[in-house]
């Protein structure tokens, strides 16, 4: 059915005709009310005008749309069919015109009008990106500031190189703060090196503050030492202190320890407060040695003792075994009393002896590394029980012996805000929430969120299993099939796929392995419910390392991760090993992994940051040596007649 074209749609539609029309010979000139000039022949039928363009197409418009027509020769008899313009095409033309108008509105003198246009552009989503990208590349600084926010809101990976270019351009300082926010929002953890680079090198305080904020929100282990280094700058000191006070990853410990040498007691007290928030059972011996060194400083010692109390409370049994090595007899007695009570409550046939090995067994049995499934939205919760059982079965060795993989179901439900429209939900804030849940449960090797909602990621309108190496995963059941059996089978394989990505498996070429590349839900039907032999071996090795991490055996985890990275030559693998070794207070071993990381080929700015990190780790090593804070010995046995 033919349809008259609204005036505001002509500009986009006729732009395509103009070049072709110019190639034709003489023709009537038709001038429309919107100023467009066409070459062709026009005839009238009541209140309609038929325009036969010289390019071979025919349009029908309202007669009133024609301002004037200069006729050269007699009007021809109307021939041919008019173009049938579908409502869908008209809608796209109108949307394109509206997007152009919104970009133009970003030049309005009034900020309220610009913010309104910015919000409407962001609401348009990916459909607006071609025009937004072009405008960002060639727009005014005012337009580009607003467009950076639009790109961040929509999430456009294709714009990342241009944003990084803007961030590094000294002539675009007015855009640097917005560019840093946009980069963090779009690229997430992949932006850590650039954000850290800008934190270290930028001259503008507002830009560096944005980078501090982004590094904190990402929980970036790469940026952690540079947050501590920011304390040297007076303009950043207050913000850096606030970030450190909220930090909860012990990767920061090595970098704050040398600050105990500050001459001011107030500063040492502040450093102690940071430290007691970061320590876990792996650092019990360090904490008690520091308490011994600062026992004559009343306020500092008080803070450090609160750290011992926190270990007892937050990590019972595990910390008690570690505290048996404390130099203070009172702390050793408190730990022994707690363990003895535990032993008295244990059935006689399971009671322990009095050897160091027995206490290590007690410690290790108290840590149970596990996978956690958590519902994202209540609609997904009914699927978790069967999924947990299926996943545990899939992760058993081919011979049937269990790998010791425990799959738990969280009692929590991650809430989903009501959707304003049917568009897929942005997975980024959901993954950030899941990452926080994972950090709060040290023994959760991975948390996997399961949702019935459709989710999206930058550059991907419908994401089945968004994740990143080292982080939590999110699995969407929304497009997995029409029947319960089909959804269940595909969900099992999709979780295995997400877990492989999160654990950092090397690319798999076996087309039946669930860890391989995945582009559509239907491909899951051809995948096995188990990893292939090579990926199963990789899973076993990685799980062993991650289990050590979850049990606070950071040095052992670092050594295993380093061996894995040495075989794969993976940059992410070397970094993971280095982080584990830093958490385990092994600066020299961490330096070795950072040197391997350098060998993977880094751009100069990135390489300079690694050099700086190695310098900071070397400083930490010298400080530990000077203070004689060596790693803790094996757990000591209890006194004779106690605990057995």
Image (cartoon, rainbow, N blue to C red):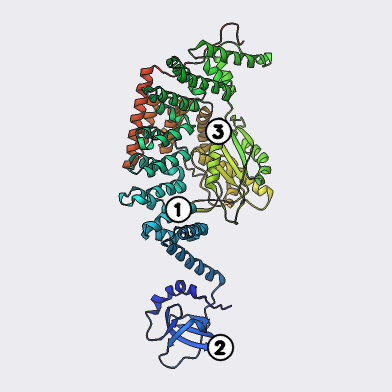
Residue 137 in the image: above or below residue 58:
above
- Rendering coords of residue 312 (x, y %): 56, 21
Quadrant that contains the C terminus: top right
Crowd tier of the residue under label 2, counting other residues whose Cα lies within 10 Å: few below 14, some 14–19, many 20 or above = few
Label 2 and label 1: CA atoms lie apart by 50 Å
Instruction: Write the residue at 44% across / 75% down.
Output: 14
Viewer-side residue, 153 vs 299: 299
Measuring from the top left, give residue 68's x and y in whole percent: 44, 86
Q: Could you say whether the residue bearing mark 3 is in a helix, strand or loop?
A: helix
Tell me the SS state at disc 2. loop
First in sequence: mark 2 vs mark 1: 2
Which quadrant of the structure image shows residue 105?
Answer: bottom left
Task: Please say whether residue 587 is visible from this viewpoint.
Answer: yes
> Which residue is at a point 54% across and 47% down the rendered structure image?
427
Specify the label residue 149 is tagged with: 1
542 or 216: nearer the eye? 216
- Structural crowding at the residue carrying mark 1, measured as other residues with C-alpha within 10 Å and reported as few (<14), some (14–19) or many (≥20): many
- Say which element carries label 1: helix
Q: Which residue is mark 3?
A: 440
Which quadrant of the figure has residue 320? top right
Residue that numbered label 2 is attached to? 46
Q: Residue at x 58, y 30 (%)?
A: 403
Name the image quarter holding the N terminus: bottom right
Q: Nearer the viewer, mark 2 or mark 1?
A: 1
Disc 3 versus disc 2: distance between alpha carbons?
74 Å
The residue positioned 52% from the left and 76% from the top of the image is: 5
Crowding around mark 3 (Cα neighbors within 10 Å: few <14, some 14 to 19, many 20+) is few
């Amino acid at each position: 059915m033919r349809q008259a074209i609204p005036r505001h749609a002509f500009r986009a539609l006729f732009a395509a005709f103009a070049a072709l029309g110019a190639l034709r010979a003489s023709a009537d000139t038709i001038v429309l009310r919107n100023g467009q000039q066409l070459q062709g022949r026009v005839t009238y039928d009541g209140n309609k005008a038929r325009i036969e363009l010289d390019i071979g197409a025919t349009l029908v418009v309202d007669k009133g749309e024609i301002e004037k027509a200069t006729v050269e020769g007699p009007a021809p008899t109307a021939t041919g069919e008019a173009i049938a313009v579908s409502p869908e095409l008209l809608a796209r033309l109108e949307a394109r015109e509206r997007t152009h108008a919104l970009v133009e509105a970003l030049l309005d003198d009034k900020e309220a009008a610009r913010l309104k246009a910015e919000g409407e552009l962001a609401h348009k989503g990916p459909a607006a990106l071609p025009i937004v990208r072009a405008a960002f590349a060639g727009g005014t600084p005012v337009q580009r500031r607003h467009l950076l926010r639009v790109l961040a809101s929509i999430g456009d990976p294709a714009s990342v190189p241009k944003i990084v270019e803007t961030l590094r351009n000294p002539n675009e300082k007015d855009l640097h703060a917005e560019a840093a926010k946009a980069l963090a929002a779009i690229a997430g953890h992949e932006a850590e090196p650039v954000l850290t680079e800008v934190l270290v090198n930028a001259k503008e305080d507002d830009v560096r503050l944005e980078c501090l904020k982004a590094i904190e929100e990402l929980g970036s282990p790469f940026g952690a030492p540079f947050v501590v280094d920011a304390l040297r700058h007076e303009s950043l000191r207050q913000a850096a202190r606030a970030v450190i006070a909220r930090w909860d990853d012990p990767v920061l410990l090595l970098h704050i320890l040398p600050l105990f040498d500050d001459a001011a007691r107030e500063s040492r007290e502040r450093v102690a407060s940071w430290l007691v928030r970061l320590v876990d059972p792996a650092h019990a011996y360090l904490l008690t040695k520091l308490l011994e060194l600062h026992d004559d400083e009343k306020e500092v010692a008080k803070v450090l003792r609160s750290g011992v109390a926190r270990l007892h409370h937050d990590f019972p049994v595990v910390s008690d075994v570690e505290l048996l090595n404390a130099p203070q007899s009172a702390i050793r007695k408190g730990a022994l009393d707690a363990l003895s009570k535990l032993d008295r409550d244990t059935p006689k046939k399971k009671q322990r002896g009095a050897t160091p090995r027995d206490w290590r067994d007690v410690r290790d049995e108290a840590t149970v590394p596990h996978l956690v499934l958590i519902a994202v939205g209540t609609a997904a919760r009914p699927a978790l029980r069967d999924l947990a059982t299926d996943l545990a079965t899939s992760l058993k060795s081919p011979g049937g012996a269990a790998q010791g993989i425990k799959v738990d179901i969280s009692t929590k439900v991650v809430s989903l805000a009501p959707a304003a429209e049917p568009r897929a939900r942005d997975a980024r804030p959901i993954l950030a929430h899941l990452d926080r849940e994972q950090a709060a449960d040290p023994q959760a090797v991975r948390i996997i969120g399961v949702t019935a909602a459709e989710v999206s990621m930058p550059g991907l309108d419908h994401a089945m299993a968004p994740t990143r190496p080292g982080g939590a995963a999110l699995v969407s059941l929304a497009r997995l099939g029409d029947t319960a059996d089909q959804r269940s089978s595909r969900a099992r394989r999709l979780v295995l796929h997400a877990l492989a990505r999160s654990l950092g498996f090397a690319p798999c070429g076996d087309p039946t392995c669930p860890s391989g590349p995945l582009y559509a839900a239907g491909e899951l039907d051809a995948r096995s419910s188990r990893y292939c032999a090579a990926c199963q071996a990789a899973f076993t090795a990685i799980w062993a390392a991650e289990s050590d991490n979850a049990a606070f055996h950071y040095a052992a985890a670092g050594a295993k991760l380093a061996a894995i990275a040495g075989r794969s030559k993976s940059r992410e693998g070397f970094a993971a090993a280095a982080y584990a070794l830093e958490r385990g207070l092994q600066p020299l071993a961490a330096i070795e992994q950072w040197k391997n990381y350098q060998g993977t080929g880094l751009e100069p700015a990135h390489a300079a940051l690694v050099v700086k990190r190695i310098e900071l780790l070397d400083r930490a090593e010298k400080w530990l040596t000077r203070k004689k804070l060596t790693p803790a010995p094996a757990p000591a046995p209890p006194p004779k007649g106690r605990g057995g």
